[in-house]
Image (cartoon, rainbow, N blue to C red):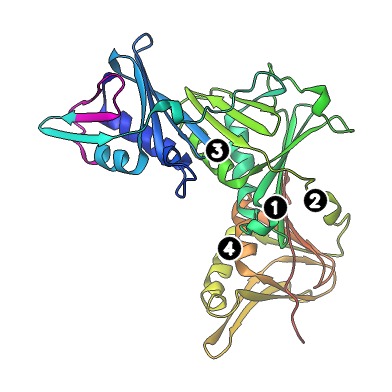
Amino acid sequence: MKFICSQIELNSALQLVSRAVSSRPTHPVLANVLLTADEGTSRLSLTGFDLNLGIQTSIAASVNQSGAITLPARLFSEIVSKLSAETPITVFSEEDSQNVELSSLSSTYKMKGLSSDDFPDLPLIESGTSLKVSPKSLIYALKNTLFASSTDEAKQLLTGVHLIFKNDNMETAATDGHRLAISKQIDVLKSGSNLDNSSLEEDGSFAITLPSKSLREVERLISSWSNDELVSIFCDQGQVVFLGSDQILTSRTLDGIYPNYKQLVPDSFSRTIDVERRTFISALERVAVLADQYNNVIKITTNIETQLLNINADAQDVGSGNESLSAVLKGDSLQIAFNVRYLLDGLKAIDADRVLLSCNSSTTPAILSSPEEIQQFTYLVMPVQIRS
């Protein structure tokens, strides 16, 4: 195998696929990245795969001899990143040899790889459900829900995001048991989508739950695209493939029945707080300086007569903070407490000038949404129990 390619392009490709390389491999080859040089297409393909998440991309290369080999991802990446960006890199390996030579300007490095035959194949999906989705819609939906997924591996299903496709629409949801984010997108599915009838729910919808780790890479991958090429998604037998812009990302699905989160959202509310979003965020971030010193808890008190919203944090043995801001208040006065970080996450996901905080009591779920209805995003956060 012998090829010549740009240092900048090779470095970028390595940074991308290395995210799918296992940090604790169960087999030595899983710590490697697969290089496949094709003389016919003049392309170099790079693949990382930890058996759960796989990423493949390709770059242009002058290929003098086709071939494939795997190299230690971390070492290879570090060497390439430090080579001159002004000069192309030449990679050479004798046939049937695992010894590889990298050269650039006056630099020459030798590495020992492993046979490409030992590298596992990325899942190939030839049947099942295929979807074509707007990249902007998918990025928007993921940004609005990923942050609410759980990091507790004991709650494996909650470490993912639940995606539902029905009638060309898409709904994404994530929860960690303390808060819930739901994003709805209209007319997301494009021409060429094909829902496999055998995988549909009783209501005609198609639903999957994917690991947040995989979807964060999907979001990062699509965000780097320079065009609006549709994202192709293929789903079958517990595997999902995202395809577009000469890049492939594969992921396993999470098994199990995702919680019926819709029943958690109250149908009506007796109290609402309508407040300017940025002002609310700024006040919370100031009070959070103290709240973070103790337990992250802040108290919100409303005064219907003065139409003022009071935010308080009391950090034992450290100090206290208080913020007051005007708001449009409806219903009886209220005192309610929240984890300030959960509240800020939801506020920052809402793309509107004003935000509506709706609730019924200090012990029942509160909902953050936009009163302007410019986005279909709902954020539920459970209040913290406080002693009188």
For label 3, the crowd category at 10 Å Cα-Cα, with few meaning under 14, some 14 to 19 and many 20 or more, is: some
The answer, for residue 236, to whether it is visible in the render is: yes
> At which x and y percent is residue 24?
46, 50
Q: Which residue is mark 1?
A: 158
Compare marks 1 and 3 and give the one earlier in the sequence.
3
Q: Amino acid at mark 1?
A: Leu
Q: Secondary structure at mark 2?
A: loop
Q: Amino acid at mark 4?
A: Ile
Compare marks 4 and 1 and give the one earlier in the sequence.
1
Give the CA separation, mark 4 to mark 1. Answer: 27 Å
For label 2, the crowd category at 10 Å Cα-Cα, with few meaning under 14, some 14 to 19 and many 20 or more, is: few
Q: Secondary structure at mark 4?
A: helix
Compare marks 2 and 4 and give the one earlier in the sequence.
2
User: Which region shows up in magenta?
Assistant: 82-102
For residue 51, the mark is: 3
Q: Front-most of 238 and 260? A: 238
Going by the picture, which residue comes out furthest to the front?
Answer: 96
Q: Which residue is mark 4?
A: 281
Going by the picture, which residue comes out furthest to the top?
Answer: 40
> At which x and y percent is residue 340?
62, 69
Label 1–label 2 contact, CB within 8 A = yes
Give the CA separation, mark 2 to mark 4. Answer: 30 Å
* Mark whose residue sits in front, 4 or 3: 3
> At which x and y percent is residue 126?
65, 18
For label 4, the crowd category at 10 Å Cα-Cα, with few meaning under 14, some 14 to 19 and many 20 or more, is: some
Tell me how many marks there are: 4
Q: Is residue 172 above or below residue 320?
A: above
Q: Quadrant of the N terminus?
A: top left
Give the CA separation, mark 2 to mark 3. Answer: 26 Å
For residue 295, what is the image quadrant?
bottom right
Q: Which residue is mark 2?
A: 259
Compare marks 1 and 2 and give the one earlier in the sequence.
1
